Image (spheres, grey):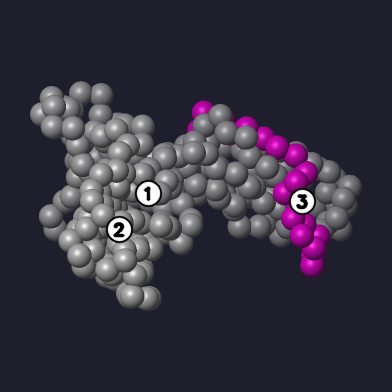
Amino acid sequence: MRRRIAAASVVAAVATGIAVAPAAHAEGRGDIRVTKTVVNGGSNVIVGVKNVKRFPITMTIKDNSGVKGVADVSAYNTTNGHGPVDHLGTTCKKVSTTTSVCTATMEIDPTWIDSYGSGNEGWDANAVAGNWQVNATVQANDRDYWISDRIALFKVKRAATLTTDATPEPVRKGGTLTVTGKLSRANWTDLKYHAFTKQVVKLQHKKPGGAYSTVTTATTDSKGHLRATVKATASGSWRWAFLGTTTTMKVVSTGDAVTAK
């Protein structure tokens, strides 16, 4: 598959070998415009260590002569310009004489992220995660065109895993219950999950038929481990819940049901 790299400054590309995003701008001619852009249905793009992630970029485009199509779409990190993403193609649907909705299919292969910048001093594949922007070049039937940067902002995040284990099972009602767990996140350098340290995670409990509520919090240690001791006042399920960061997904563990006797 041919790899597409985000639009780059020629000088920076020659100097470092890594694509660097240009300053935000828009240029072209005529009245064609992208009036709305939605990335991945409005959700974050979550990338793990093995599975290829495909996601749509949906653009509403208007021109008084009608829309011819989309010439190019690119996306990359707004801070460092890294964009190891493929544009697989775009399809357009005409909704009126002046308006079309065009959907670009994008793909991020986690096994390619590290090689995207390999050989460059200080390269960190995980720096790809964070805030991204979308650029697009659109064309009209009357030969109008528009080249737009930052028609949408979205987040690419590292996948995460979270476990829960509550002991003893069963527990004496009113006795002490110890709840442990581990928070890990995808590392795009070695394609493994590593401990996510120094993160505050919520310990939640729900009674049978009820809803989860937060009981306490704990902070992951140097190995991503969590540990909390609580009083077992009632039977129910226990779980850990992590709210996520700018670069790492939100994740909630599977509940561990414990009977209090």
Expressed as whole percent of the image width and height from the top left, the position of residue 88 reads 22, 62
Please state which amino acid type lies under the numbered disc 3. Ser
In the rendered image of this protein, does residue 197 appear above or below residue 114? above
* Front residue of 244 and 36: 36
From the image, tell me which residue sits under label 3.
Answer: 213
From the image, tell me which residue sits under label 2.
Answer: 32
Q: Which region shows up in magenta?
A: 204-223
Q: Quadrant of residue 13?
A: top left
Position of 176 with respect to 4 (left or right) is right
Image marks 2 and 1: residues in contact by CB distance under 8 Å = no
Expressed as whole percent of the image width and height from the top left, the position of residue 118 reads 18, 34
Labels 2 and 3: the sequence-earlier one: 2
Q: How many marks?
A: 3
Q: Is residue 80 rendered magenta in the image? A: no
Q: Is residue 166 shown to the viewer in this render?
A: yes
Q: Secondary structure at mark 1?
A: strand
The crowd level at tag 2 (other Cα within 10 Å; few <14, some 14-19, many 20+) is many
From the image, tell me which residue sits under label 1.
Answer: 151
Image marks 1 and 3: residues in contact by CB distance under 8 Å = no
Please state which amino acid type lies under the numbered disc 1. Ile
* Front residue of 200 and 180: 200
Please state which amino acid type lies under the numbered disc 2. Ile
Q: Nearer the viewer, mark 2 or mark 3?
A: 2
- Distance of mark 2 from mark 3, alpha carbons? 50 Å
Q: Is residue 89 shown to the viewer in this render?
A: no
